[in-house]
Amino acid sequence: MGEKEVVIITGCSGLIGSALINKLGGHFTLVGLDKIAARQPPPAAECVCIDLTSEEGMRGAFARINTAYGKSIASVVHLAAYFDLTGKPSELYEQITVRGTERLLKHLQDFEVEQFIFSSSMLVHAPTEPGKPIDEDSSLAPRWPYPQSKVDTEALIHTEHGNIPVVLLRLAGVYNDRCHSAFLAQQISRIYEKQLISYVYPGDITHGQAALHLDDLMDGFQLLIQKRRVLPPELVLLFGEPHTVSYDTLQRTIGLELHSEAWRTVSVPKTIAKTGAWVENDLLQEEPFIKPFMIDLADDHYELDINRARKLIDWTPKHTLIDVVPYMVKALKADPPGWYRDNKLNAAQVAAARAGAEQEMTSMDAAAHHKMMRHHADAMREMHFRMLWVHFLNILLGVWLVTTPFVFGSFDQTSFPETILRVTHDRGLWEPSWRSAALVWSDVASGLLIMFFGALSLSQRLSWAQWANTLVGIWLLFAPLVFWSPSAAVYANDTLVGALVIAFAVLVPVMPGMSHEGMMDHFDVPIGWTYCPSTYLQRLPIIALGALGFFIARTLAAYQMGHIDHVIDPFFRGTGGLNGTETIITSTVSKAWPIPDGGLGAVTYMFEILMGAMGDRRRWRTMPWMVTMFIFIVVPLGIVSIYFIIIQPIVIGTYCALCLLAALAMVVMIPYSLDELVAMGQYLVQSHRRGASFLRTFFMGGASPGSQQDNKPDFGAAWSAMSASAIRGVTMPWTLVASAIVGVWLMFSRLVFGSIPPLANSDHLVGALVITVAVIAMAEVGRALRFLNLLFGVWLIVAPLLLAGGSLAAAWAAVSAGIALIALSLPRGHRSTEHYGSWDHYIA
């Protein structure tokens, strides 16, 4: 196979393997052995797929090597091994590292191998103290499964290498100019993000770990291969920098480079650190980098004596870690997401850090920008012309509204049903005829205004008229409530026309006043996110729940206004011959509102439906004000709904079945809308940091340099794909579902135990709040809110001691519920693979 000598490298697609191929390429004929994987080694080596755990696979690989390259092999660099950071024993250490090496040596006996280099670790040695370096003859005392597997493999090589000369190469922690060291990358990222944990260390901060630059390691490998014929038949070598940098020095250097401040680090007791690690790993089910076993090793100090390597192969490192740290930090600052990805960290958390430098407009000359804006203006004029039909429809709706009083006979209506007269007397309202006349003239005036503003909207220059018609539409939604419409037909007509006017004014056509730059930017995935939070599929559950709430509230309003004489409630009884729902919506609490509170709820749900349908997939950045209004309606009014549910049995003494269903619909909307709120908030912060006006961006939107396109299925995909897309960002861990069930139990425990206030009211109040928190926390961006249920759990435990009104069984039930709630609220539960930019920090 030519004159070049053959070198085989196992684990050839890894960091060290790839670098070694690049180093030796052109000097040797290179053969790479590795598992089938997405990563491929550099092209200088042929990659032969191999599985160290498979005898058949090993046999096939060496048959290929024998056929293509012959029997003569200059060197085998064995890098492949199993490694994880859990600190727990694993059968894979034995199967891959130990037995895999055994199989490798077995098949190499059939070849003429001049050298076998095994990549071991300095961690096989017992740790030492500063000023007392370790040499190759120092005692072996591996402290966790990974170095133990290296010790076991070294022992196997000693007995099984036969006539093959071997080098047991014990390496310090390898790094390069972009870091690529798991422990060091975590240390740098913690300081970069100014995490609280970056200020503490559970060990002696004057201790440290020896390090080794990747380039120096490559030089060492090359020297070992070149001088293989003069080396002892069995050689142990330590590779590393002779000066070990302490943890404290590293911290201070990193802090200076990143934030121009010497990072101060405080030693904390191991018991405290272990408790924190246990809470994160086992109790909260987080996946932090720091594991409990690492805390035991925090005091370990590794300092190396490399005189043997100097003497035998004339190898001395040319780099020092403390001098390379500035290069690592420079690479991080230049491209935080890329640096995080290279070091296998969560790049979503820092994706926005570089966005400000990537604005497309800044790299565009004035002429090109002017040309683009002109094309966009032409496109907007063409779109306005194509959408003129919506304004003509609004004009027709205005005509309809002016003429409907004649169709309904509202001008001369003098007789009204008994239910209308009852409501008039019960609520102390104006006479029905006066209210009917006032509503008629309101409709006529509104119709004329809609016609007028609709006509003005035909001109693109008078886009403000669209907003004027929107205000008229909003008034139409409220007018029947303000005048307590005696006519069900007029109420329905005004609601329908008002909603359509709003839709045709600003929902169907392009909303006026939006930023041109924002509209020209077609990307819809926020920086650092893995999906678009504003797709129509994701808004569909909100719209559907809004429709359910609207029809329920509309029914309640019809009863309150006297349009119907009965509301169905199959579960709860009320007072005075009324059922629970009728009692609630005619109570003093309900009468405290100047308009029918059921009608106010219907208007709110209608707003949710309209806002849910408004805007395209980019609205988290093109319509921040609208997203804010949408969230303002969903979240606070969802909390208000829960408040009314809470006070029903406490103040009124019964429940309203339809109110419970409507409140549930309102609360379930919240987790589906939170991710859009977070994305919008992040965008506003990023835009402000880029120097844009906060208020202008809030009301007009803008572009988002650094965003991506979401190509996941939308409408038209398979039902399974559509369903998965509709609930992205929302998961239902069993712990939260169980917490909600505990909340339901608490709300109705008074019916089981016959409890009375104040304990019964306490259980009911806490139950409603627990359900609310559990449901909202199902949104991954709101997962940390579940910790509020810890407080409610504590209260449930102490409440029977402070409040009367319950039996011993009721007290123990409350305590048991509190304990269960605490246990259920600690674990984070299942989390999807989605990312939320810098908000990933808060998904605790």
Image (cartoon, rainbow, N blue to C red):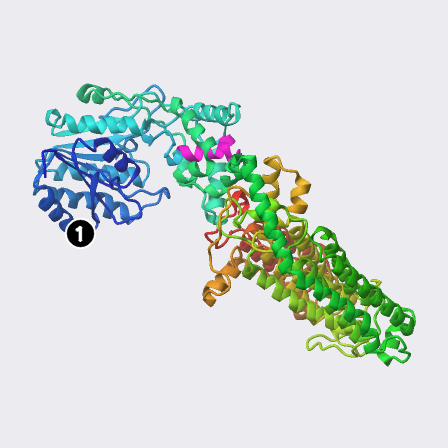
Tell me the crowding category of disc 1: few under 14, some 14 to 19, or many 20 or more residues within 10 angstroms, Cα based.
some
Task: Work out whether residue 703 can be spotted.
Answer: no
Residue 761 position, x and y percent, is 72, 61
Image location (x, y in percent) of residue 603: 73, 63
Please say whether residue 520 is one of the residues in the magenta stretch. Answer: no
Residue 674 image position (x, y, % from top left): 60, 53
Q: Quadrant of the N terminus?
A: top left
By secondary structure, the bulk of the magenta-drawn segment is best described as: helix
Task: Please determine whether, in this image, residue 434 is positioned above or below residue 303.
Answer: below
Residue 409 to residue 469: above or below: below
State the residue position of label 1.
57
The reply, left or right, for residue 831 in relation to residue 660 is left
Q: Position of residue 808 (x, y in %)?
A: 66, 63
SS assignment at label 1? helix
Residue at point 24% right, 26% down? 219
Instruction: Residue 29: name its quadrant.
Output: top left
Taking the spot 71% from the left edge, 78% from the top edge, the residue there is 568
Towards the viewer: 100 or 319: 319
Residue 21 horizontal side relative to residue 489, left or right:
left
Q: Residue at x 32, y 46 (%)?
A: 89
Relative placement, left or right, of 113 versus 372 is: left
| Observer-nearest of 118 and 478 | 478
Q: Is residue 402 above or below residue 120?
A: below
Q: Is residue 775 visible?
A: yes
Q: Amino acid at mark 1?
A: Gly
Membership of 196 in magenta stretch: yes
Magenta segment: 184-200
Q: Residue at x 85, y 78 (%)?
A: 409
